[in-house]
Image (cartoon, helix red, strand yellow):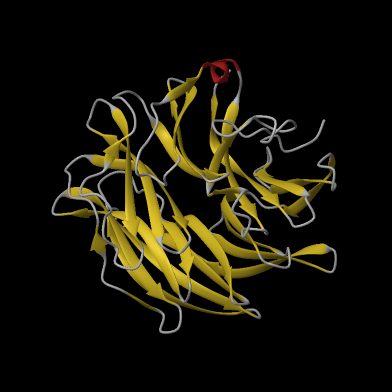
Amino acid sequence: MAFIRGYEFVLENKFGMVLNFYLNTQKHIEYIISDEKRKWKEKGLVFNQATEKFHLDIDDNDNIHIISYSKNGCLYYHQYLDKEWVNHLIFHYPTGQRIIYPIIKHINNQIHIFYYLLHDESRDKAYLLHLKFYDKEYSTNHIITVNNHEYINPFKVFVNDDEIIILYTSVVEGHEQVLISKFNMSTEKCSDPLCITSSKDKKIYIDALPYDAKMLHLIWSKFDEEYLTVQYLKLDIDTMTADKSKPVSLSSKSSCSFPILVHYKKILWAIWTEMEKIVSCYSVDMGENWSEPHIHEETKKIDFKRYRYLASHTDNKEGILCDFVFGTPYPNIEFLGFGGENDDEIPAK
């Protein structure tokens, strides 16, 4: 039994139905849906072309919006209309260019798409593009250029009123740092980047969680060429200043990978993998103080993976708030590492 690399999507709509989106063995976008009692019901196919990556969002009306990048270089937008999936080709990138980490957001009845564009001739750079898609028409602009060494971290996108907060890493004066920029949706301009770290170590597996439009909680693994250590930092969204002068280490020096943040029932959880097991700690005062790490020994005996979790009822402060979460595979998807396990089970038996 082991940690399964890659991730899938779990969506929960306002009727209590659960949808699990994933790439099947042919790399086609597929999903399975439950009924209101959370019993798996039927499978469906979104797109029958080999897909590299996809991302999705759910709006307030429970409409699902999907962006995908296929193996032949095509960027698609997928929408469920009149009881069938409709696939809109946005752009076909030529050989020598490719897309990584596509993200889609439904904001104010418009589709906003973000992704890194890579060029073969400039392998040490990634170009963050923003694409606004509406009624089959789109506009695109280049908003950020990222410098990198060997590995390009995924970026994060958060909506905050009329701004989009973009969290990413880039090489600054020879060392990888975490930066934040604010993108104004009205002017479609990006602010100057704010560098929020200064250490010389590598920073990978970055995750973040905004809360109450006031604070942004960040977590990542610090890599010092031998060990991985989980680091936590809290920022004020308005001023973009760190709540504490330095990041806080939540773990020992080990193989601590894929750290995530989950807010559940007024408790903030930090969860990661370590030696093929799940480890977690929690804070009851929103990151001011943290418990000692707890190793979930039972996870050594089971398969588990990461899910990106979305819900249309995000105003429920007692519910799950996160981007990623660990869980057991289909058909018995059960979230792991936080809360009570009876409350974390997705499908009813």
Name the residue: 34% across, 44% down. Answer: 288
Name the residue: 43% across, 20% down. Answer: 275
Look at the image and tell me in which quarter the N terminus lies: top right
186 vs 325: above or below: below
Query: Which of the two residues, 152 or 336, is positioned nearer the viewer here?
Result: 336
Residue 228 x/y as whole percent: 31, 30
131 vs 287: above or below: below
Q: Is residue 241 visible?
A: yes
Residue 50 x/y as whole percent: 63, 49
Q: Is residue 95 visible?
A: no
Query: Which of the two residues, 156 or 348, is positioned nearer the viewer here?
Result: 348
Query: Which of the two residues, 116 or 234, is positioned nearer the viewer here?
Result: 234
| Residue closest to the far bottom | 187
| Quarter of the image where one finds residue 60 | bottom right
Look at the image and tell me in which quarter the C terminus lies: top right
| Quarter of the image where one finds residue 343 | top right
Residue 123 x/y as whole percent: 30, 53
| Residue closest to the far front | 285
Query: Which of the two residues, 192 or 130, is positioned nearer the viewer here?
Result: 192
62 vs 35: above or below: below
Name the residue: 53% across, 49% down. Answer: 323
User: Looking at the image, how many numbered discs can be counted on the residues?
Assistant: 0
Specify whether 114 is left or right of 43.
Answer: left
